[in-house]
Amino acid sequence: MSGTVLFCTDTFWDEAGDRVVALDPTLEVVRLVGDEQVIASELERITAACFSSDVYPDRMRAFLGVCGRAPRLAWLHTSFAGTDHPVFDALRARGIRITNGVGVSAPSIAGTVMLYLLALSRNLPRWTREQDARRWEPRRFDDLAGMKLGIVGMGSIGGEVARLAAAFEMEVIGLRRRPRGDEPCPTWAADALPELLAWADVVVVTAPLTDATRGMFDADAFAAMRPGAWFVNVGRGEVVDEAALVDALARGHVGGAGLDVFATEPLPNDSPLWAMPNVIITPHSSGVTSRSYRRSIDLFVDNFGRHARGEPLRNVVEP
């Protein structure tokens, strides 16, 4: 397929432009340079776009604004897994095909989940405070082996978390809307959430944001968890009622948390979560590694080759 005009960032083009042109020598490119405006005559030429991970967070608005104004855009590839933002709904409503990066960051995100669990098991925040104060206070801590881990959301990230947790000899049960039978651990249907919460020593949320998952972790859900259990969220911030989580943490009913995503990002300075000694906060960056970035580029290059040859694309996001 010739005549493709690709919109991408200058960073992405410097990294992968030669590989893309090798697949279609007729390709033309419109680049987002810094955060400069794209002129109207260039907007009208764009037929495909690569929303690469280097746009996050500073150039997201500029990049997606161009996509929204490009009248001939027919295909948008996003390096991110989530497409729940309203801008993607608006693009789909125009008939634009969207492909995503689901699975690209799963190994890296799962590694961050294990970081949270190891840090919580050893009370790493306390060790860090003691190091800052030059205090030598040896103490006993717990291993992950033998702990019960419940994973809410058994997509690519949940599967990677289950695989790593098994290596640490944790007992793992997953939860998904409709179990398929090929999951790497026993997996229950979504209506078994109360049973999973009552069973688990650790609850890890990797679920996407949908009408069914929005606000699913409310006061009742936290009350259903075992006293002292840990809570980890690398899915979407809106899945959690943050006020209810803060209350459960303050009372000690939830014993600790590792949080990468929040309802409002950046997390506001006045959020009580910042000051809680049993909470580990990362700035929505659990999957931001050199390896995941390379994997995201490889996925787009593969998909562009399919596009150029007129073959079916990978990771098409269904309406």
Image (cartoon, rainbow, N blue to C red):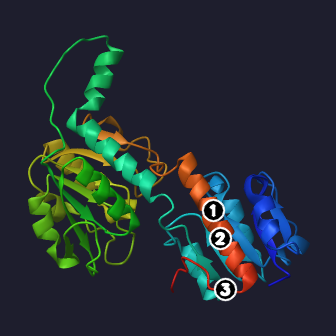
Up/down of 143 relative to 76, above or below: above
Residue 150 at x, y percent in the picture: 20, 60
Name the mark on residue 252. Answer: none
Check disc 1 and report the residue beneath it.
Answer: 298
Circle 3 crowding by C-alpha within 10 Å: few under 14, some 14–19, many from 20 = few
Q: How many discs appear?
A: 3
Check disc 2 and report the residue beneath it.
Answer: 302
In front of the other: 275 or 287: 287
Q: Secondary structure at mark 3?
A: loop
Residue 225 at x, y percent in the picture: 13, 57
In space, the residues marked 2 and 1 are separated at their CA atoms by 6 Å
- Identify the amino acid type marked 2: Asp
- Identify the amino acid type marked 3: Glu
- Identify the amino acid type marked 1: Asp
Q: Secondary structure at mark 1?
A: helix
Up/down of 220 relative to 145, above or below: below
Q: Quadrant of residue 184?
A: bottom left
In front of the other: 84 or 300: 300
In space, the residues marked 3 and 2 are separated at their CA atoms by 11 Å
Identify the residue at horizontal 40%, vertical 62% (top origin): 236
Q: Are marks 1 and 3 in contact (CB under 8 Å)?
A: no
Name the mark on residue 311. Answer: 3
Q: Secondary structure at mark 2?
A: helix
Circle 2 crowding by C-alpha within 10 Å: few under 14, some 14–19, many from 20 = some
